[in-house]
Image: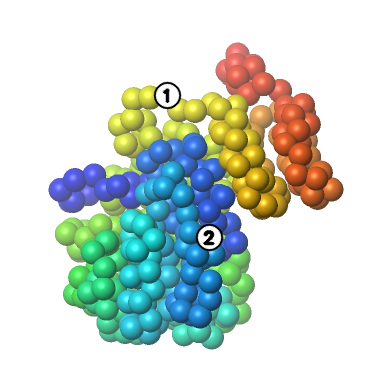
Amino acid sequence: MSASPALSPRRVSVAPMMDWTDRHCRSFHRTISRHAWLYTEMVTTGALIHGDVARHLAFTPDEAPVALQLGGSEPAELAHSARLGERWGYDEINLNCGCPSERVQRGAFGACLMNEPQLVADCVKAMRDAVSIPVTVKHRIGVDAIEDYAFVRDFVGTVASAGCEVFVVHARNAILKGLSPKENREIPPLKYDYAYRLKRDFPQLEIVINGGITTLDEVEQHLRHVDGVMLGREAYHNPYVLAGVDARFYGATEPAPTREAVEAKLVEYCAAELARGTYLGAIVRHALGLYRGVAGARGWRRVLSDSKRLARGDLSIFDEARAHLTSPEEFFEKKALQS
């Protein structure tokens, strides 16, 4: 079990995922779980220094708690970006030391930073000196052919010496050349024991494990060894998995929302965003998996993916999509009777 003195607010979190965990996605996930810790997509320091800060950082209070993930490797730029994040109301600043994409490598950040632990420590110190909210690091367990546990142990030790107390461990190596980001999420073998060993070697640190975790039973198993579990693609493609999080891992007593209740909140959100000129498809793409496992879910996805319907911005699209579904309660009652 974890040696931490208290349960982590990051007991269950949803990973930062490029092109996916935008503000619409986070608002949707928050209607399913009030307590799961949410992350932005990675935002580069360059985008904040030279771009439209509001476009990258604006979010609604209803999304909280939410962490801002930064991509960068220059301490002063990261400190400036962290200050912006705190000013905009984020609950945590997370440094990306795990993304293996070549585009990110060209910017000299992401997983390649694991080869420069002292630089990461300098970045962490600069951000910690700049903000009062937690500064955390998300990283892999190794880079390319470096598979020895000592590599990640020494990385964590060096960065922890700069004051970082929370490490999110994607329990795979990052292959910097020859694999796409998608392949990097699937091909390098998972080594959960490395994350467990980090918790044993650094009991004072908060260790969150990430990689290939798909069920809440698996979450519970991992929590016997570490402080938190980060769900990635499963939470995106099967978002209703988050419905069981609050009661099971945070002690919530209120019942989980039904899929229909989540959908009703989504429709309300879409109506408000349409009034602001938001394209409907930018929102509903995050809800394609809401009825995963329910008979007719394919029809739901097909209707909500229809570009012509979406372009009309007509919320009756939800009625059309729902018409393909068996009632979730009816569907699961039938499954229970058959089992």
Counting residues from the N terminus, which is met first, the one under dot 2 or under dot 1?
2
Residue kind at label 1, given as amino acid type: Pro
Looking at the picture, tell me which residue is in the foreground, 169 or 247.
247
Q: Is residue 10 left or right of residue 52?
A: left
For label 2, the residue is: 17
193 above or below 178?
Answer: above
Q: Quadrant of the C terminus?
A: top right
Q: Is residue 15 visible?
A: no
Measuring from the top left, give residue 93's x and y in whole percent. 35, 64
Estimate the spatial distance between the alpha carbons at disc 2 and disc 1, rounded to whole Å.
28 Å
Q: In this view, does 339 lie to the left or right of 92?
A: right
Q: Is residue 295 left or right of residue 139?
A: right
Measuring from the top left, give residue 204's x and y in whole percent. 17, 59
For label 1, the residue is: 255
Q: In this view, does 114 lie to the left or right of 338?
A: left
Residue kind at label 2, given as amino acid type: Met
- Are there few (<14), some (14-19), or many (20+) residues within 10 Å of tag 2? some
The residue that appears at 60% across and 67% down in the rendered structure is 183
Q: Quadrant of residue 315?
A: top right
